[in-house]
Image (tube, rainbow, N blue to C red):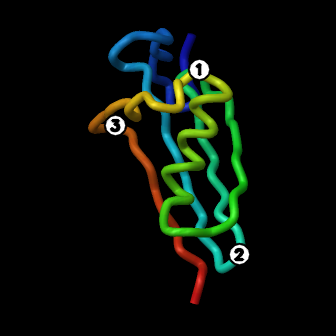
Amino acid sequence: MNDPRGQAAPRPGSEAATWEFWIDRGGTFTDVIGTAPDGAQHTAKLLSSATAPVEGIRQVLARVAGLAADAPLPRVGRDSGAELHDTAR
């Protein structure tokens, strides 16, 4: 199966199966949107803090992928990752 960019979709569990995260940190809330390797999107909303972006990624991965609370976050692939947008002034 191909993704919208015409590339072969990676198999879950394969090295190419990576998540992408977009984070919007505002003055009150931090929103995290994660796109799973299968293209499904998952969200988390937290009170803004210095650790909220990482906590939001952990929440999404715990809920969807079963990441244990004490487990390290998976490594980010070279062609994927996280984007942080700070709207607080």
Question: Which amino acid type is marked by label 2?
Answer: Thr
Q: In this view, does 30 lie above or below 66?
A: below
- In the image, is 18 to the left or to the right of 66? left
Q: Residue furthest left?
A: 78
The residue depicted at 49 percent of the width and 40 percent of the height is: 20
Is the residue marked by circle 3 packed among few (<14), some (14-19), or many (20+) residues within 10 Å?
few
- Along the line of sight, the residue nearer the viewer: 62 or 87: 62
Q: Is residue 78 above or below residue 71?
A: below
Q: Sequence-wise, which precedes: disc 2 or disc 1?
A: 2
Count of numbered labels shown in the rendering: 3
- Along the line of sight, the residue nearer the viewer: 1 or 16: 16
Q: Which mark is residue 76?
A: 3
Nearer to us of marks 3 and 2 is 2
How far apart are the two marked residues, 3 and 2, measured between alpha carbons? 27 Å
Could you tell me which quadrant the C terminus lies in? bottom right
Nearer to us of marks 3 and 1 is 1
Q: Sequence-wise, which precedes: disc 3 or disc 2?
A: 2
Check if mark 3's residue and mark 2's residue have beta carbons within 8 Å: no
Residue 39 position by quadrant? top right
- What percent of the width, then of the height, locates residue 85? 52, 68
Q: Sequence-wise, which precedes: disc 3 or disc 1?
A: 1
The residue that label 1 is drawn on is: 66
The residue that label 2 is drawn on is: 28
How far apart are the two marked residues, 3 and 1, measured between alpha carbons? 17 Å
Check if mark 3's residue and mark 1's residue have beta carbons within 8 Å: no
How far apart are the two marked residues, 2 and 1, measured between alpha carbons? 28 Å
